[in-house]
Amino acid sequence: MQGFQLYEHASTVPIASYNTEEWQKGYRSLKQEYDYWVDEIEGEIPPELEGTLYRNGPGLLDVNGERIQHPFDGDGMICAIAFKDGRAHFRNRFVRTEGYVAEQQAGKILHRGVFGTQKPGGWLANIFDTKIKNIANTQILYWGSKLLALWEAAEPHRLDPRSLETLGLEFFDGAIQPGGSFAAHPWIDPSSQFDNGAPCLVNFSIKAGLSFTINIYELDVEGKVVRHHDHPVPGFAFIHDFAITPNYCIFFQNPVKFNPLPFLMGTRSAGECIQFQPDQPTKVILIPRDIASCPKPIVLETHSGFVFHHANAYEQGDEIIIDSVCYENLPSVEPGADYRETQFEALAPGQLWRFRMNLETKDVQRQLLESRCCEFPFVHPAKAGRKHRYAYLGAAHTAEGNAPLQAILKVDVESDQRQLWSAAPNGYVGEPVFVPRGANSSGLYTELQGDEDDGWLFTMVYDSKHDRTDVVILDAKDLEKGAIARLHLKHHVPYGLHGSFTPHYFES
Ligand code: CO
């Protein structure tokens, strides 16, 4: 192992909880599309559990043996696990994007990917007016009776919620133009003050250029865009996620610069031209949601760092508080580098930080909430934009250092207590999706029906020993009692990105 010199007390570093070759096996394509009842189950699926868990992620890590350079470039594949009466049905389907269909027909890679896969195209290519491949691989969400597969640099794809058949691109009645985009991290405001307290979906898109523009979209429960506003911001942006409060959309403009020359010359992909600027601050951009009064964005500055994901934000007096997974820096993507050879120990771990932003004094204070390596934060949906007590995260098995995610961590930000469920040494986890015990009459989880941790956590765990993936259900109140149910799939599912749950049962 390398990189132990990075630790202050090398002697306290535990023996690795994982094996690199075993971890790598989770990064193989799953080319086959399945459709079956899960019949191998350890434990018991809660009989009252009803609904469908959707998950998106790269399903292909190669095209006909030609390697995709980075998993972020892999074609989106949806898994749907439908639960009812203690049973579970599994289905997976690739999103039939234009690029996926063309490459499968050609039997080779036709597009250059944002993160290193070679061929013309790419996301920042909007600037250079070259064609992009919409890979639809990041998030999947059921909203307004539509199942939408999202990728931040292009239009959503609409799918059939039962068969997962691709129905086409979604433009929300013209709110998004062809060639436009819709980010992969929408929030559901459980009680929008602009909609008489009804829930609404809030999302954004980034339009790149010499400066960039943040577009905000708010959709009502029918899926109609009811508010849309644009805000030009100077500089370059690499913004994957955001957070909301009742009054603001919050963006972290990470300190990165983009040198387009190697990209234009064709020697580097767009992602390989992004360089972290450790001497520059992170800018926090607060965009007011009240478009009636048209207020301008507020820009604050904080410590340099890189954020992919925010857990949640809320307002308290003059302050806005946001909990985010923050890295000390963003390693450059080097041309030809193999992501499977990641030296975890040499990289800064993601850690959970709390930022307190005072809107009066413009002061930003930050505080480390959790030093354990973690990612993919999730809170109760009724707490979106409101003060939360619990955050759930994918985490490393050991408390120190950087490592693959092998555990699910529950952080109680009030009592500072922790619960951990670990799948080490053979298991590698994904995002924990928290599902409250009861949905409301409109099929949403926007009201707190019991305790904030009254519900289940779902995660997909690659079991390297059996070379298959398990869908694991945990009791969110008590992670340490172990899995309630462990559903053994008949195959592996490559490591994925984000998912969501709907109380609608979509089996066939
Ligand atoms: Co994400």
Image (cartoon, helix red, strand yellow):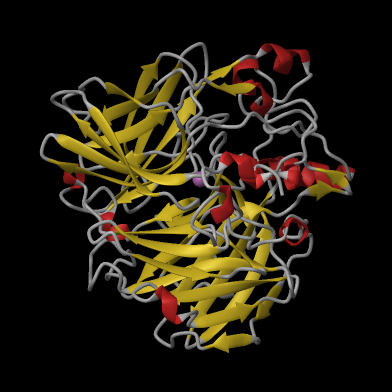
Work out whether residue 194 can be spotted.
yes
Q: Residue furthest left?
A: 317
Q: Residue at x 54, y 55 (%)?
A: 12
Q: Position of residue 265 (x, y in %)?
A: 77, 13
Front one among 371 and 281: 371
Q: Position of residue 312 (x, y in %)?
A: 32, 48
Front one among 38 and 282: 282
Q: Residue at x 69, y 40 (%)?
A: 73
Decide: is 441 above or below 171.
Answer: below
Q: Position of residue 309 (x, y in %)?
A: 45, 43
Q: Position of residue 47 (x, y in %)?
A: 43, 88
Q: Which quadrant of the figure has residue 228? A: top left
Front one among 9 and 395: 9
Q: Residue at x 65, y 21 (%)?
A: 273
Quadrant of the frame with the C terminus: bottom right
Work out whether residue 162 can be spotted.
no
Decide: is 284 above or below 343.
Answer: above
What is the number of callouts on the image? 0
Front one among 119 and 416: 416
Q: Which quadrant of the figure has residue 405? A: bottom right
Q: Residue at x 80, y 32 (%)?
A: 336
On the rendered structure, is 212 left or right of 39? left
